[in-house]
Image (cartoon, helix red, strand yellow):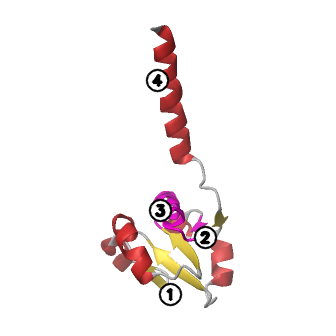
Amino acid sequence: MEYVNYLVIALFLFFMLKRFLPTKGVNHISITELKAELNDKDKQYVDVRTPGEFKGNHIKGFKNIPLHQLSQKAEKELSNEKEVVVICQSGMRSGQASKVLKKLGFSKVTNVKGGMSAWS
């Protein structure tokens, strides 16, 4: 009986850690690095915040595809051939979006650390 309790706790910890660990194969860049590459036409830039957040403040060149719509819209609106650079408000949703894109088969995915909160 006690063994089962330990197993349940171990599984719970595993799934919690897995959720917050960086996704394999996803690059992470700072706002400074993003500013240096914003004019790169071989990359596509996606803001996964809500339309209201995007309307309030966004970086020119970023396309708004809210996180909850990413699975449905990514394959129609994004090219699998180009790198996808993802941003949100703090870096949490873009981290989740990076996982979604990797599962959909996008091989080149980059998450912006700190998100729009770090943009000045």
In the rendered structure, which disc, 3 or 1, sits on the residue that comes first in sequence? 1
> Which residue is located at x 45 percent, y 60 percent?
93
Q: Amino acid at mark 4?
A: Val
In the rendered structure, which disc, 4 or 2, sits on the residue that comes first in sequence? 4
- Residue marked by disc 4: 8
In the rendered structure, which disc, 2 or 1, sits on the residue that comes first in sequence? 1
Mark identifier at residue 61:
1
Q: Is residue 101 above or below residue 34?
A: above
Q: Tell whether position 107 is magenta.
A: yes
Q: Tell whether position 50 is magenta.
A: no
- Residue marked by disc 3: 100
Name the side, left or right, on which 76 lies relative to 42.
left
Alpha carbon distance from label 2 to label 1: 21 Å
Alpha carbon distance from label 4 to label 2: 34 Å
In the rendered structure, which disc, 3 or 4, sits on the residue that comes first in sequence? 4
For mark 2, does the 10 Å Cα neighbourhood hold few (<14), some (14 to 19), or many (20 or more) residues? some
> Magenta segment, which residues?
88-112
Q: Nearer the viewer, mark 1 or mark 4?
A: 4
Alpha carbon distance from label 3 to label 4: 27 Å
Q: Amino acid at mark 3?
A: Val
In the rendered structure, which disc, 2 or 3, sits on the residue that comes first in sequence? 3
- Residue marked by disc 2: 107
- The quadrant of the rendering that contains the N terminus is top left
Q: Amino acid at mark 1?
A: Gly
> Which residue is located at x 49 percent, y 81 percent?
59
